[in-house]
Image (cartoon, rainbow, N blue to C red):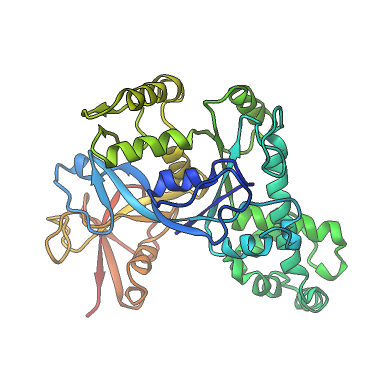
Amino acid sequence: MQIGIVGKTNTGKTTFFSAASLVDAEIGNRAFVTIKPNQGTGYVTAKCVHQELGKECQPQNSKCENGVREIPVTLLDVAGLIKGAWQGKGLGNQFMNDLMQASALIHVLDCSGTTDAEGNPTKGYDPAEDVRFLEREIDYWVKGILEKNWAKISKAATVSGKPWGPVAKQLSGLGMSEEKVKGVFEEGKFSAKPSEWNGQEVLRFASAIRQRSKPMLIACNKMDLPNAKENFEKLREEFPEKIFVPCCAEAELTLRKAAKAGLIDYTPGSKEFNIKGGLDEKQKHALDFIQEHILNVFGSTGVQQAINKTAFELLGLIVVYPVEDANKLASGKGHVLPDAYLLKKGSTAIDLAAAIHSDFVQRFVAAVDCRTKQKLGKEHALKNNDVVKVQLSH
């Protein structure tokens, strides 16, 4: 799974990416520091099921630290967006193309209002403008994809009587299946005759496609600066349907680096850390500031929470643990609870088989709930923290 880290320049986007992945990306207070997308591994975290089952886990495709299972996801830090990116301005075309395969987006927003629309230092800027701006840019980009050969596509869609088919083919690069596009038609009450749509209707459809194919969480960064808390509350009032997470990426990066250097014990997403020693006065002062003004106020730096909420709230994912031995809860090599998979809520036993290996779909016989030892059919919907044995034919 890929999560795109997006936003205009100088909002702390690359700092967020570095804090989440510990990839040493270039960070700077100027436009287009990020040109080629930075790619790294972040983690979705959840309480590991081994505690409930009284087992010591031996993770293989993930990690387990202090009872927290860390499941890897790919993070993409793409070039900062400017107005008119959908028309190719700045690095707009590259930005959009880099996001084609992203399952979701985290919009890193300067909640303090200290960067203007172009990413230059200012005071009193309304961050709500950035929420509208970024969505609008992606809407127009999707509209541009739709309008390539639109006369031909819309005519075929109208004649077919099932307009989602031809339209889905045009949008396949966004990961939009025919079923998903059909859902957009039905939920948005769009006419089944796209050839009769005007420009505004095409844009409305593009916006609905963007919401379905690129759901977005907003990480309200720089919460340690003046005006940020006030702006945060205003944003939640103005956009009650959106998910906002208070965030201080710079603090998270400081904590992650200090932990890596062995100066502190820190679990990402935690509300506290323990000092191990070796700090000079400047370092100790910086950590005291983070504890008092960020962790004590917001409960975390927000970086890990943004990733977790993207997975579990925005995308509606669950964690499932496949094993080969239902009694020992182990793999064929004897590793206990070796793997953790992120699946869409409502996924079935055969969906799990497909996630493990595409060949397993054809070989699928049944599955077993390792807690109850109940046999599960291929259409059985899995639940969060299920431990499942997948039975295959030889």
Relative to 295, residue 321 above or below:
below
Image quadrant assignment for residue 214: bottom right
Could you tell me residue 141's position as x and y percent?
Answer: 71, 61
- Residue 365 horizontal/vertical position (percent): 29, 72
What residue is rendered at 81% in x and 68% in y?
194
Give the number of callouts.
0
Front in this rendered view, residue 137 or 327: 137
Above or below 307: residue 361: below
- At a point 48% along the width and 33% down the height, the residue shown is 248
Query: Which residue is found at the position 68% from the left and 60% from the top?
Result: 92
224 over 95 or under it: above or below = above
State the image coordinates of residue 13 (x, y, percent, origin top left): 54, 45
Instruction: Using residue 322 as the reference point, say whether residue 149 is left or right of it.
Output: right
x, y (%) of residue 102? 53, 59
Q: Quadrant of the N terminus?
A: bottom left
Image quarter of residue 78: bottom right
Q: Nearer the viewer, residue 27 or 247?
A: 27
Looking at the image, residue 113 lies above or below residue 322: above
